[in-house]
Image (cartoon, rainbow, N blue to C red):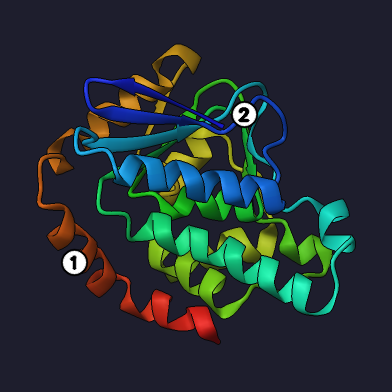
Amino acid sequence: MDIDRDRGVAVVRLGDGPNAFDGAFVAALDGALDEIEADPEARAVVTTGGGKHYSNGYDLEYLGSLAGDDLGDFLDRSRRVLARVLTFPLPTAAALNGHAFGIGAMLALAHDQRVARRDRGWFCLPEIDLGMRFSPFMLALIVARLGERAAHEAILTASRYDAAGALALGIAQAEADEAGLVPTAAALLEPFTGKDRGMAAQLKGDLYAPVLAALDE
């Protein structure tokens, strides 16, 4: 996971593969956030992947290798990194270069803004087809971002949304071609930059207090 910097915008490059959530991915994302938060010159954060995936969700093979406390600890850490993105003291945007599935889609929703690639990539919450339930925190995050009507559709149909569908449902705020993803994401964040970091984090915490309260449920 690399960080590029362009005029105060920290661009987190998640990687060129599936960017699936495993222990290393969660640790790397948390570390990238640490580095950006410690940088006084950073004004905004954009995350993006390479290839055909933004994030393909949980690494199911990795999940299957865990049990007991190890599994519970990993699931807790994966939710808490989403909560950290949700309340990050700088404005954040997800530049969706490709597929965002499951917790990868929820990572996108944790950002302040989202840009969908016009010619590639699905946004999907496939849990109903996988026989999986959402944790209270994840469910609260989805509803807070999409509203009950859109969340109902996305969760209970497991529909795959392209850029047009993501815009229509309120998943994304803009669309762009591949080259325009990061610049469009940075432009969306411009009105939110230059604010006091501590106050931004506090107000995000206030806005999403019911979501954050579900972390420990």
Contact (CB < 8 A) between labels 2 and 1?
A: no
Under circle 2, the secondary element is loop
Residue 131, image x, y percentages: 82, 69
Mark 2 vs mark 1: in front: 2
- Between residue 115 and residue 41, name the one nearer to us: 41
Type of amino acid at the residue the image marks with label 1:
Leu
Residue 62, image x, y percentages: 83, 54
Quadrant where the image shows the C terminus:
bottom right
Q: As displayed, is residue 49 above or below residue 153?
A: above
Q: As displayed, is residue 125 above or below residue 184?
A: below
Q: Is residue 204 left or right of residue 68?
A: left
Q: Which residue is mark 1?
A: 203
Residue 98, image x, y percentages: 61, 30
- Between residue 152 and residue 12, name the one nearer to us: 12
Inter-mark Cα distance, 2 to 1? 31 Å
- Residue 21, visible in the rendered structure: no
The residue located at (57%, 32%) in the rendering is 1
Residue 40, image x, y percentages: 20, 38
Q: Which residue is mark 2?
A: 15
First-in-chain label (2 vs 1): 2
